[in-house]
Image (spheres, grey):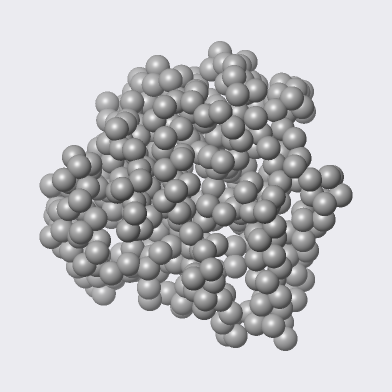
Amino acid sequence: MKLTIPLNWADDYFDKIDFSQTEEIYAKLGNDVIGGGRPSLTSPTIKKERVKEFVDEAHRRNLKFNYLINATCFDNLETTKKGYKQLRELFDWLSEIKVDIITVSLPMILEIIKKNYPHFSVSASVQTRIDCAEKAKYWEDLGADKINISYVDVNKNFDEIRRIRKQSKIQLQTIANLMCVNRCANVTLHGNYNAHSSQCNHISKGFSFDYYFFSCTEKLLSNPVEILKSAFIRPEDIHLYEELGVDNIKLVERTMTTDHLARIVKAYTDRSYDGNMMDLIHGLSKYIIYNKQNLTKKVEEFILQASFINVFKAKKIIDKLNEIRNDSTFNQCFDLYIDNKKLDGFMKYFANGKCVRDCNECDYCDKFAQTAIQLLVNEDKHEDKMNELRNLKTQMLNGELFLV
């Protein structure tokens, strides 16, 4: 089993990452005509000339380069003369700079590539929510060379992964370290939101105030046992997926700084991590590139747009979030310590098919949470921070953020 790891476009990327178990790196422009799975707000800005330099360096290191065209919605422009032409221009450029793989979410785009650019390998994005063998077969028959299974739905459903593997001849990949709510109902909706917030010609102009992110973060951090119930796969447990026939483990996050991305890659390369599991998770932490002071201006540029939001109230929220991040405890891991080694053996319950997906009838995860999870601050301080997240959502729902 090999790793597929993110590229953050940082100058120190190739110097600090251990690529010994890596087969493929992936990235995309901060925005392009079709957009992708992350808003432009959180993505580094890079020029096309630099993209080619990274592709060339990847090839020098025997790494494949995967460009993401993984937006879940293109506003139907793919079926228009202008939209189709823009897509072909994007593919022509990717072909010119010798990208190896393209990850897609829309079936029509996969077929366009296979018909006109057969030299590209194509991967079906996790955004397609492939959660059963029937969906996997659909994408395989359409021409996909690799599929990303829906980690939120099947990472803990070993029987379904076996079915997918048995009925699919192409490569299988799953994401290991995204902290998403178990079987999240908002995955596709969140994907649409991110797509439109990273499309260069969209009416939203990159505006991003992410209801879905704040909702899920509040739910997970208010009741941290939900993190254990999530789709997260520890480095020590990826062998279980290797035994199922999964070919690649994909890691996130391409919005992270190189130092922290290097730590995650090392943990999964070594298949072991002795420390706080939260170190390996993307979220409201110092790992996000835009937490660096020199990108604060970019955050304000995308959010503080008077035509979309009450600028005065949005500025107060941004200042409050920065205050939280500047608190050393929260900046590290949002005040949670999850002892990774105390979760040894945790995944066997799922691998053995004992989970019946009814948490009202089972306290298995709660028992592990009692010994593995602790707060690094007192409960009152933790609850204060949760209330700040809840208040942010309330301001969105009652219109305070949008009404003058």
Q: Is 58 above or below relative to 294? A: above
Image position, residue 366 (x, y; %) = 75, 27
Q: Is 368 above or below relative to 199? A: above
Query: Closer to the camera, 135 or 368?
Result: 368
Q: Quadrant of residue 373?
A: top right
Query: Measuring 71% from the left and 68% from the top, which residue is drawn there?
Result: 320
Q: Residue 140 vs residue 135: left or right?
A: left
Q: Is 134 above or below relative to 95? A: above
Query: Measuring 68% from the left and 71% from the top, which residue is drawn there?
Result: 319
Q: Residue 371 vs residue 348: left or right?
A: right
Image position, residue 390 (x, y; %) = 76, 59
Q: Quadrant of the C terminus?
A: bottom right
Query: Measuring 70% from the left and 28% from the top, which residue is drawn there?
Result: 372
Query: Closer to the camera, 124 or 133?
Result: 124
Q: Is 230 above or below relative to 354? A: below
Image position, residue 159 (x, y; %) = 49, 20
Query: Measuring 79% from the left and 49% from the top, which residue is drawn there?
Result: 382
Q: Quadrant of residue 2?
A: top left
Image position, residue 61 (x, y; %) = 20, 42
